[in-house]
Every structure is written in C-alpha cells, then in structure tokens.
Amino acid sequence: MNIRADIPSSSPTLPPELRAWLGKERHLLIDGKWVPARSGKTFEVTDPATGEVIAKVAEGDKADVDLAVKAARRAFESGPWSKMSPSARGRLLHKIGDLILEHADELAALEAIDNGKPKNVAKAADVTLSADMFHYMSGWATKIEGKSIPISALAAPGSDFFSVTRPEPIGVVGQIIPWNFPLLMAAWKLAPALTTGCTVVLKIAEETPLSALRLGELLLEAGLPDGVVNIIAGFGETAGAALAGHPDVNKVAFTGSTEVGKLIVKAASHDLKRVSLELGGKSPNIILPDADLSLAIPGANAAIFFNHGQCCNAGSRLFVHRSIFDKVVDGIAAEASKIKLGHGLSEGTEMGPLVSSVQYERVNGYIAAGRDEGAKEIVCGGDVPNGKGYFVAPRILTDVNPSMKVVREEIFGPVLVATPFDEIDDALIAEANNSVYGLAAGVWGKDTGRAQQVAHKLRAGTVWVNCYHVFDAALPFGGYKQSGWGREMGQAVLSNYLETKAITTRLGSN
Ligand code: NAP
Ligand code: MG
C-alpha cells in the first residue's frame, strides 16, 4: 500500500516522530487493540491548508461498531473496570490528563495539520482544556453520591423503612463527535462517561480523526482496561448510524449539527435509548451603548472569528446600539483585517483554513446568498494564502434583516452579521431570541446590573457578560431550544451518564 509518510512540501515540517506516526496506517481501537476495519477499507485524511493527503485511517462501519459495542459491554459487565474502586478510577483519569499535557506539543501539531487551526491556539485552548476536563472529572469519581430520604409510606405496625438513592452508571455509551475541536470534543465526552463508570464506543469525525486516535494510545498508556473505550473512525451514515441505533447501547451522546441531532433522536427512539445532544447555534452578541469599546470590539472580533468561526457558540449575530454602530463595525473590521491567515504550523498564523472543501463551498455559498439578498459585505483583510488550502477571509455583513438566510442559519465560518438597535427594550430581546437555537450569547456594557438584566432574558444556555468564549471544565455548557438536550461539563454532565436507583428496605417487623 502506498501511504504518504511525507508531509507535502507546501506544509511546514513536522517532528520526525509525528511524521513516522502519520506514515503508518492508523487503525480502530477495539477491546484494547488497534485493528484494521473488518472490511479492510481505509479513507484518506487531508491537510486543509494544502488539500494534500497526510494519513490513511481504517474506515469502520457497522461490523466494527458491533465488535466495539460487544467489547464495551463485556468491560462494563465483567471486566476489571466494573470492579475498580472510584478512587482508582479517579487516579486513572488524572493520569490521562497528565499524559495529555505531556504530549501537548504533538497533539497540537496533529490538530493543526488535520483541522487546520493554528498550533499555538490548539495548544493553549484545545489541549489545555482537554487535560483540564480529565483532571476536573477525576475528582468527581469519588463524589458520586446518593441520598438517604425519609419517606411517609405506610409500613406494617412496628416497622419502618430506610430509603436511599444510588446513582449507577448508565452502561454502554455511544458517543459521536464533530471536527471543529476534535481532541476537546473527545475529552468532553470521554472524561465524564469514565468518571461515572460507563464504558464507551466513540465515533470520531471522518474529517479529523488523528488527535483522538493518538488520545486512544494515551488512554492505553495510562492503563485503561481493554474495552472501556473503543474508538471508531468512519463516516456518519455508516458507523455513526450503526452506533446511534445499536440495540446494546444504553445511551447516545452526540455533538454536531441540529440536522444530524434529529436523526440521532430517531435512531435512538426505537428502544428509547437515553440521548444527550450538543448542537448548533446562531448566538447573539449585544453591545450596549455604554460598553467599553476597548474590550467589546476585540471581544466581538474573537466571538465570531476564533477557530475561523467554526464554533457552535460563535457570536455570529451582532447587535450594536445605533449610536456606536459604525465605530464598532469599523473597529471589528480593522481588528479582523490584522488576522494573519496561514498554515496551522507556520510561525505567526492566527487563522487557518476551513476544515474541508465541503465547508469551504458551504461558507462561500452563504456569503454569496447574503450578497444576493442585499446585504452589504465588508471583506476584512483578504490576504488569503495561495494554493489549494480552504482559506476564507473574515467577513462582516451589514444591512441585513431577520428574514435573511445568513441571519437565520448557522454558517459555521468567519461570517458576522451586524444589526443596529435603538433601545434596550423587549424588541431587542425578542430579536436576540429570534432563533431556533439557544446555545450562547454575549452582552457588553459598563453598567453590569443592566447587562445582567439583559442576560437573564436571553434564552441561551451560556451568557457571557463583558467577555466571550470563556470555558471551564467546572461550568455547565449546553443549549436551550434546538441547540440541544443536557449539559456538558461541570457537575451537570454527570447526569448524562447516570441512572438513579431508589432502594427501600423494610427495617425489622416488631
Ligand atoms: P455533523 O455533520 O452533524 O457531524 C457530527 C458527527 O455526526 C460526525 O462524527 C458525523 O460523521 C456524524 N454523523 C453524520 N451523520 C450521521 C448519522 N446519520 N448518524 C450518526 N452520526 C452521524 O456536524 P459537523 O458538521 O461535523 O459539525 C458541526 C456542527 O456541530 C455545527 O452545527 C456545530 O454547531 C455543532 N457543534 C456543537 C457543539 C456543542 O457543544 N453544542 C460543539 C461543536 C460543534 P462524519 O464523520 O461522517 O462527519
Ligand atoms: Mg483533515
């Protein structure tokens, strides 16, 4: 088989160990072993900055999912995992967090060549937050407690009852993740499931399988027993659908588009599997007239353009008080024009390409639709690297109205729509809430009391006041409305992976 061990000449160089790792066909993790797909099929992984093939990965489908679920079931019911103490489980999770930090450089480089994001950003954000998630969740392993509950039920004369709740792991969990934060999405899913004692089959995104496969190696290095985490690379319609509908999977945890989220619900409904969903967004970011613009302008810039706009929580609908509208839009355009586009491994790159040709076409399609519908387009910078990379310069669209496609739909690219408002009133709140989504929002204003009042009225799972994109393993994150079901992170995520059992005992009979 002819596998490219070299990185295309147009890409900056990679460390030799990573080059060697990429030169070997990457396999699926099933029952503690790296195995090719049963079908023998592979798919190619590309560097979106160059369009060139950088690795070959086994393409898992239903047959592999079946084996993985079998391994996860055995590990859940009878393997060493089922007997491991909470404290030992916690230590293991902590060790995984440590290993992620030890391999930060390598994991960040994989994100850069696979997803396209700048390596330094991947290291500071994706890798750090992934390690944080394992470290934070490691502490919960020993703190998953039930309650003793006084009850009033009638007992036989002379006896009473003792009732307790016992949270128990839900069982075998199928997890499906997207490509925008490949390592971090794996960490957000795996860490809480493992803390609670579940076992997992993780379906990673076909566009970006590399960092999660490397994480799989680190899980084994940390000493995770065979079958506790199984990792399937492959496509949504085959591997993903097989996992979402698998009769021996107790719960499906999905992150991705709202459209596919609805398919997951359908697939899981025939046997009423538990489902949690982290879906899309079209988040409002509101700049009040008294906002400190030295914070709000760079803040609004980062809110939309961080990760090239490929964030479910991107602040993609900007509302600015009319008195400062031009100043803010010009300010964001000036900030965005300074963003240096380039290969994720190149020195000084601040924004990479979009993840794939599909996303490139999709985002450019939205920009064209905005123009066709009469929006005014401000192209920021425009200094896009030559070659085959899927680079898109940041855009701001003004003169927009709520019925436009670019205002209603999630673009998932570096495109901001900006609208002025006149009063901080119900009409502003209604417009900010005028979306099928409800994932996140931002409010900027020096009068934090007033900003809080606005925050309370926004129908979103996260609201940032005078900041944006502040994530922490301890904070719950998730959506209202069609942005999802359930929460990731914080104590709240534990309920995604636990069932509550009530045990009532009759005490004596005299
Ligand atoms: P997507 O198309 O929904 O894909 C997400 C995952 O689902 C991928 O692994 C995909 O496989 C798989 N999939 C596709 N069709 C499937 C099916 N019929 N059954 C089971 N699995 C299936 O989303 P995406 O384009 O990769 O990611 C972008 C979306 O994710 C955006 O809408 C964004 O807002 C959302 N997102 C949300 C959060 C959050 O926390 N709320 C975080 C990140 C992203 P493939 O490998 O074939 O693609
Ligand atoms: Mg890729």
Image (cartoon, rainbow, N blue to C red):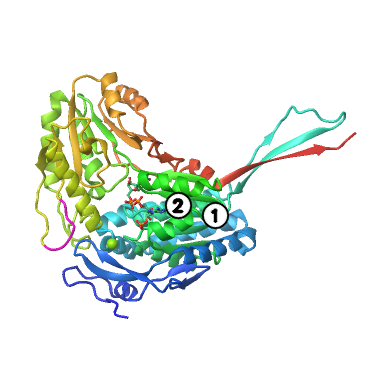
Instruction: Name which residue lies at 60% across and 63% down.
Output: 74
Q: Secondary structure at mark 1?
A: loop
- Where's the N terminus, which quadrant? bottom left
Q: Nearer the viewer, residue 148 or 250?
A: 250
State the image coordinates of residue 482 (x, y, percent, origin top left).
38, 37
Q: Secondary structure at mark 2?
A: helix
Quarter-of-image position of residue 158: top right
Q: Is residue 332 something that shows in the picture? A: no
Say which label, 2 or 1, has the lower sequence index.
2
- Give the overall secondary structure of the magenta segment: loop
Whether 42 is drawn above or below 126: the answer is below
Query: Which residue of the protein is positioned furthest toward the right in this rendering?
Result: 510
User: Which disc number belongs to residue 78?
Assistant: none
Q: Nearer the viewer, residue 178 or 149?
A: 178
State the image coordinates of residue 195 (x, y, percent, origin top left).
53, 52
* The magenta stretch spans residue 448: no
Whole-number angstrom distance, CA of label 2 to CA of label 1: 15 Å
Residue underneath mark 1: 249
- In the image, the segment drawn in magenta is 387-392
State the image coordinates of residue 232 (x, y, percent, origin top left).
44, 63
Instruction: Name which residue lies at 43% across and 71% down.
Output: 37
Q: Residues within 10 Å of mark 1 (few under 14, many from 20)?
A: many
Residue underneath mark 2: 189
Q: Amino acid at mark 2?
A: Lys
Whether 465 is drawn above or below 412: the answer is above
Q: Amino acid at mark 1?
A: Val
Give the total number of marks visible in the rendering. Answer: 2
Mark 2 close to ligand 1, CB under 8 Å = no
Quarter-of-image position of residue 39: bottom left
